Amino acid sequence: MNATTRISRRTFVGAGGAAAAGLLAGCSGSGGGGGGGGSKSMTFLNDSDIKDNPFGKAIEAFQQQSGISVEVQPVPSDYDTKFRTVLSGGKPPDLIKINDDYVRGMSATGALLDLAPLIERDKLDVSHFPENLLNFPKQADGRHTAWVIAHSPRLIYYNVDMFKAAGVDLPPTTWSADGWTWDDFLATAKALTVPGERFGGLIYLDTGYEQTWAINNGSPTGIFAADGSTFTLAEPQAAEALQWATDLTCTHKVQPAWGDLQSTNADLQLFAQGKLGMMFSQFSTLPYTSQNAKGFTFDVAPPPAGPAGQLTESSVVTYSIPAKAENPDAAWELLKFLTSEEGGTFFVEGNMWLSMDDRPLAKLAEPPAHVGLFVDAVDHSTLPNQTQNTLGARQIYRPMLDEVYNCNAKAADVLTAAKPRVDESLTKPG
């Protein structure tokens, strides 16, 4: 899921290696910016405006050091349609934001430059990178068609004062299931809920819960099969997990109704107003929460452990260089800078994302008191399997799930009904 901006659930929360090496032969080999191999300008398509935020400050530092001018082209709405349109055109931007879930599908079209020769040629030191996130964009044939610049793990945010006032034990402060299972979460949510005044918890609004809860309930693959060919969210263990999360609303009344959560940042506003005790959300929501949660202390905890595990999902912030880019050398220099120790420091100090280079992570600051749990999440992570057409699949099954979330149908029935259409969509590159 895209981690650059907060988006509603309905917003849709990947050239040959030898040719690429030749094309970029003039590129600098440094990991923190460089001369750009002769190209002194580049264009950059992004899904939001980065002016005055940590990302924008990182771009400014890169321009000053490299002498390369970066023209950012923000597309704040309907980004998925825009980037596909420009990518298929004859003159795409030099760098594009790409939803991590779409890397495989776009890679299959040949529209993305293979970065593997550049990684090897420049002898990049990736020893400080999380291996699973570094290799996430790597394709089965060895092509490395996108570059992960940062990540945004999900944890449970909770209102410490509300816990204490209700006489409820606080969640664990380490990655532990001790006293922190799904049953414990439900019992806690019930204790925190005051009808008409506040809700105890919120799980199902952040779409990352689909993969996380399915895997933790024992689903072998989560949303999609390992080879990306079938829709495994419809299988019993996965469907049961989605039903559990929905029942927090429909059966137990400890979670806000689906219809009350469709405005932008509805979950964050409820939490900041003291009307929500716990919520499953990303690291990237930390700035909003820190600025707006007044009058109470908040902290974070790992997701509650399901019957089969206690993993979470990170949103992976990915960018690609189009195969037809006019200034790929400059774009590559920018990608290297953003994942250098210096570049990553901008993201960490601004609480925007976690850096790929782990050295800036020591600069994470409170609040919350246990902010380090976000770093620990790297070792407790699951990522959805890639498909050729994740976008097409989501456009089918997620609207259908509204019937479940509105308490009008069961998850197993809706997902089973969706499966034939979703499976068919996965056969078509999207």
Image (cartoon, rainbow, N blue to C red):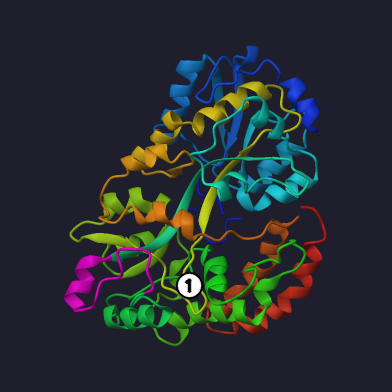
- Find residue 197 and report its image quarter: bottom left
Indicate the position of residue 209 as horizontal and vertical percent values.
51, 67
Task: Name the residue: 41% across, 71% down.
Answer: 202
Q: Which residue is mark 1?
A: 259
Q: Nearer the viewer, residue 250 or 153?
A: 153
Magenta extent: 159-177
In what element is the residue under mark 1? helix
Magenta-drawn stretch contains 176: yes
- Find residue 175 and report its image quarter: bottom left
The kind of residue on which mark 1 rests is Gly
Residue 407, placed above or below residue 266:
below
**Left or right: residue 64 compared with residue 362:** right
Magenta-drawn stretch contains 276: no
**Left or right: residue 337 compared with residue 135:** left
Q: How many marks?
A: 1
Q: Residues within 10 Å of mark 1 (few under 14, many from 20)?
A: few
Q: Would residue 53 be seen by someone viewing this image from the given angle?
A: no
